[in-house]
Amino acid sequence: MFVRVIYYAFAACLFLAPATSQAVTVSFQGGPQTAEVINFSSGGFTVTATATEDGATALVGQNQTLGIGVNGTSINSDSISPSNPDLEILILEFGSEIQVETLTLSNVSANDSFRLFADGVEVDSGNIEDRSPGQTGSVRDVDFSSLAITGTIFQITNGSSNNDVFSLASFNFTAVPLPAPIALLLAGLAGLIVVGRKRII
């Protein structure tokens, strides 16, 4: 009987163990359209895009080539200054926790920089060209895979006041597996032991 309990426990662990997640890419190219909320889906995941400018609700703009931006198709910091911040923030909300792998930014020019926030905390920033070595042109893949950035709500904005202008073409990520429900596993084992004892009696 004890061997049978161990067998069922092992089978339950295998069944409940998190599977290795496959990378999913959400493309934001399409439209064109402009709205306060735009929903995207890929690989069973839904991403909701919203935006703010100077702390107020702004429009998300979508373009077939560039992707999405704020009040148009770019995240633009043309007017950043202490008196007129004009800070545009693109917000992406996922239905469950994910890990950022790669952001593809378009319309990138020299010295453009970014800031990335996960669940309200700044997790990375830098010059887009520096973060995409060996790449040329206006479309750049910025790799975050080594940083293990996770969350459900991500904010992307410009990094400085030197006329940063870029768009978000796609977002590559993996799902963060939920931990195995240990309490459920223990309850199942207890149930197996009780049933086994009743059969013996």
Image (cartoon, helix red, strand yellow):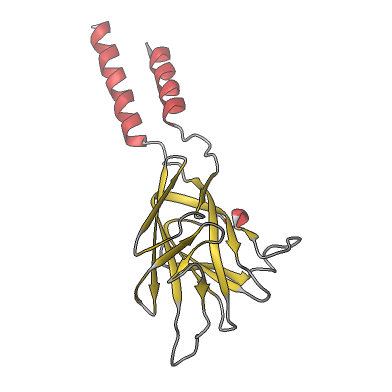
Number of numbered tags placed on the structure image? 0
The location of residue 140, given as percent across then percent down, is 65, 61
Give residue 135's quadrant in the image. Answer: bottom right
Nearest the camera: 18 or 23? 23
- Which quadrant holds the N terminus? top left
Q: Nearer the viewer, residue 52 or 16?
A: 52
* Image location of residue 62, percent across then percent down: 46, 61
Residue at figure coordinates x 52%, y 51% from the top left = 27
Q: Is residue 161 left or right of residue 97?
A: right
Q: Residue furthest bottom?
A: 83
In this rendering, position of residue 104 left or right of residue 190:
right
Residue 40 sits above or below residue 166 on the image: above
Of residue 142 and residue 86, the one placed in the foreground of this image is 86
Image coordinates of residue 143 in percent, x first then y, are 63, 57
Across and down, in percent, residue 73 comes to 49, 67
Q: Nearer the viewer, residue 49 or 192?
A: 49
Q: Is residue 55 above or below residue 192?
A: below
Q: Quadrant of the C terminus?
A: top left
Task: Identify which residue is drawn at 31% across, 32% down.
Answer: 184
Q: Residue at x 42, y 72 (%)?
A: 71
Above or below 88: residue 136: above
Residue furthest to the front in view is 32
Name the outermost residue toward the right.
Answer: 134
Does 132 sit above or below residue 98? below
